[in-house]
Image: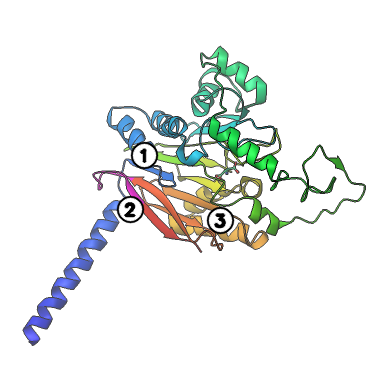
Amino acid sequence: MAAGGGLRFLLVALRFLLVALHMAAASAALPLVVNTWAFGKATETAWRVLQMGGSELDAVEKGCAQCEMDQCDGSVGYGGSPDESGETTLDAMIMDGNTMEVGAVADLRRVKNAIGVARKVIEHTKHTLLVGESASLFAVRMGFPYEDLTTPKSLSMFSEWLNQSCQPNYWKNVVPDSSKSCGPYKKTEKVICKEDWISSQRRISVHNHDTIGMIVIGESGTIASGTSTNGAIHKIPGRVGDSPIAGAGAYADSTAGGAAATGDGDIMMRFLPSYQAVEYMRMGTDPTVACQKVISRIRKYAPKFFGAVICANTTGSYGAACNKTPGFTQFHFMVYNPSLSQPSEQVVDCI
Ligand code: ASP
């Protein structure tokens, strides 16, 4: 009996050791692809690009483009998140952590491959961010076709919203009362400047928001990151979120780490969470803790904000964190590294 108990103990200990070894391997191996949400096809595409000798930037571009084509969760690419006029517009960025170059597009119209256009901003301009109709003109010059980003699904989301008296929306201090009726709105004489964090939580949640944010680290430690999204549903035309802003939506520095964010960009972009997470990792903070620290910092001001961050350091260690709210208690993200035979969906409990 005692011998049997001892054996069982040994087996359990051995199992723990194997799991620990596996986790250590899974958490610190290069190359590495990490991306937000359970967008596994994007992970696989990025991994394949690396295996075929592509660069880290190629992997980020093609991985995020996969989501643009697949309309991941309806919140990346065409046919999702119609704005107040019913149009889908796209935000994307890509960053090279060796040269610190960034290419980004925001409020891009009638062009599907937003991250492809962002890459062209790096390759063919000395700028960082192009926006709106002019970004679309640039895209056409770079050889991208004009296409309609509206689909029957985005049209029906738009008409449903109109039928619900344009609720929810992003206006405040306007007449007629934006919490009851559609516009056009005019400004009120009296302006209440207090930020309404609570109602912002109602507007933006896991149900109407997502971005693909991706970090790729090559065998030599070169880091690239990027994002692509169609932003916030029913946004005011012209609204740009965190995703195309370096340091907010994503950041990469091959001497420290990479990070990417998803969630309520109107709030998150005020805190540059991706930049901040990379700086924490530069100081030696573990990626999971770095992610947690930026989430906690935002939460001090916006306790109910919807958001999550992924982080990875130069050794291939990675982690994620999210802000716990009633509708959002766990965050799913994807990982691929040499210890895995396929993209692995991982889950963190929100803090
Ligand atoms: N952060 C994006 C935005 O606010 C959307 C999201 O990730 O949910 O545009």
Q: In the rendering, which numbered label is found on residue 43?
A: 1
Image position of 336 (left or right of 92): left
- The range drawn in magenta is 336-345
Q: Residues within 10 Å of mark 1 (few under 14, many from 20)?
A: many
Residue 251 belongs to the span the image colors magenta: no
Q: Position of residue 144 (x, y in %)?
A: 51, 17
User: Residue at left 60%, top 47%?
Assistant: 272
Residue 338 belongs to the span the image colors magenta: yes
Mark 3 and mark 1 in contact? Answer it, CB < 8 Å. no
Kind of residue at disc 2 = Ser
Cα gap from disc 3 to disc 1, whole angstroms = 24 Å
Which quadrant holds the N terminus? bottom left
Q: In the rendering, which numbered label is found on residue 294?
A: 3
Camera sees residue 286: no
Q: Residues within 10 Å of mark 3 (few under 14, many from 20)?
A: many
Mark 3 and mark 2 in contact? Answer it, CB < 8 Å. no
User: Residue at left 44%, top 47%?
Assistant: 37
Kind of residue at disc 3 = Val
- 284, 147: nearer the viewer: 147
